[in-house]
Amino acid sequence: MSMIRDLRAVVRPSSRVSLRKEPSASYDTTRDPSTPSAVVDCAVYRDGARVQSAKPLSPQEAMRLVRRDGGFVWIGLHEPTEAEFAGIAGEFGLHPLAVEDAVQAHQRPKLERYDDSLFTVFKTIHYVEHDRLTANSEVVETGEVMCFTGRDFFITVRHGGQGSLRALRHRLQDDPELLAKGPSAVLHAIADHVVDGYIAVADAVQDDIDDVETEVFSPGRRGGVSRGVDSARIYQLKREVLEFKRAVAPLLRPMQLLSERPMRLIDPDIQKYFRDVADHLARVQEQVLGFDELLNSILQANLAQASVAQNEDMRKITAWAAIIAVPTMVCGVYGMNFKYMPELHWKYGYPVIMGVTVVLCLGIHRTLKRNGWL
């Protein structure tokens, strides 16, 4: 999926789940007390390499270096307040509407174009590990990454505890040829990273759905308690899949725009690689839609099985009630206080009546069992 193997012969890690590796000493940054607390990292990149400085740069200092010597600045922030982001927004001339969205978060994935920048919103998805799926299990956890792409700057605003971009920054810094393409290369790398995460989560969710499907259609399932738990688990899984769908589906159109429509801020060499991201995203969307339909079918089948089991229980109750009705009727007849009942004074009356009662009960039991009611 990545463009790295086409730009240069670089072997990517085999796993899609994690891009993390140990950073080298040159990447370590210590936050300066004078910088806003929301700033995770701020660096200037020139010719694909990080410009080293004696002390951590503030966003304003980094931008002055870029305007003087060229290159671009990449600023990473985590959950900034309006006051913390105001200075950066003013320095880079960010649109007020985009700034408001970035600070408040809870935005729908989208791509918005302003005069001198692009504003992109990504929903990050993290799979929550669990030993067994329950009615209250959290399967996916979402976060947000907002990206401001300019001619000489790239700003990321991250919300949520998941979706850290530190490992991605380190990986890009290890590939100067790619990073030399500028801010659009960083935007592609983040889109690629986010969609890779979707693929990993989709595979994990598929395993959960397979487990639920196996249990629902297991031939040994019996009992109302088990059925109740299964229905709640299926419904909870549907809710988590819906949350996954809300992250994936709206992002497809922005990725198609980035891959198909020429944009001043997107390097032509980078743009074609967004098509690959869009293709993988479309495949994930198809998977998620399939998950939703499959869970609907599993839930309907589970409810149908519960109805069938209830009908079977009712037939058994009815069958036993029919058998018990015979001695009840006999006892009711001979419990009447009539003066003239010849059987009461007959020597063999009691054993004959008991025998007839047993024979009738056995006959009814055999008939009902042969017809599948018992």
Image: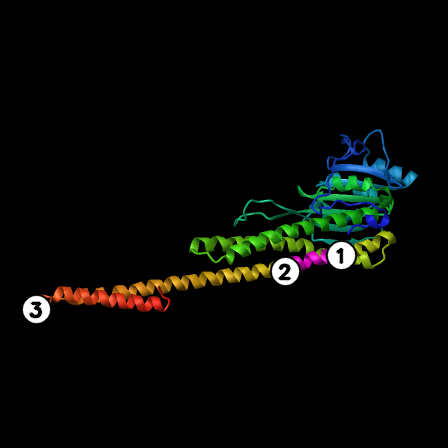
Q: Label 2 amino acid? A: Gly
- For the residues labelled 2 and 1, the Cα–Cα distance comes to 18 Å
- For the residues labelled 1 and 3, the Cα–Cα distance comes to 95 Å
* Numbered label attached to residue 290: 2
106 relative to 183 in the view: left or right: left
351 relative to 179 in the view: left or right: left
Q: Residue at x 49, y 61 (%)?
A: 303
Quadrant in which residue 307 is drawn: bottom left
Residue 171, compared with residue 55, is above or below; it is: below
Q: Who comes first in sequence, dot 2 or dot 3? A: 2
Q: Residue at x 73, y 55 (%)?
A: 280
Kind of element beneath mark 1: helix
Residue at the disc numbered 3: 339
Residue 139, compared with residue 26, is above or below; it is: below
Q: Label 3 amino acid? A: Lys
Residue at the disc numbered 1: 278
Q: Label 1 amino acid? A: Ala
Q: Nearer the viewer, residue 219 or 79?
A: 219
* Numbered label attached to residue 142: none
Asked whether residue 335 appears in the rendered view, the answer is no
Kind of element beneath mark 2: helix
Q: Residue at x 67, y 60 (%)?
A: 286
Residue 165, compared with residue 364, is above or below; it is: above
Q: Quadrant of the C terminus?
A: bottom left
Q: Residues within 10 Å of mark 2 (few under 14, many from 20)?
A: few
Query: Looking at the picture, how far across and down is residue 347, in whole percent?
Result: 8, 65
Q: Is residue 287 magenta?
A: yes
Asked whether residue 339 appears in the rendered view, the answer is yes
Q: Nearer the viewer, residue 103 or 251?
A: 251
Q: Is residue 90 magenta?
A: no
Q: Which residues are magenta?
A: 277-288
Quadrant in which residue 370 is drawn: bottom left
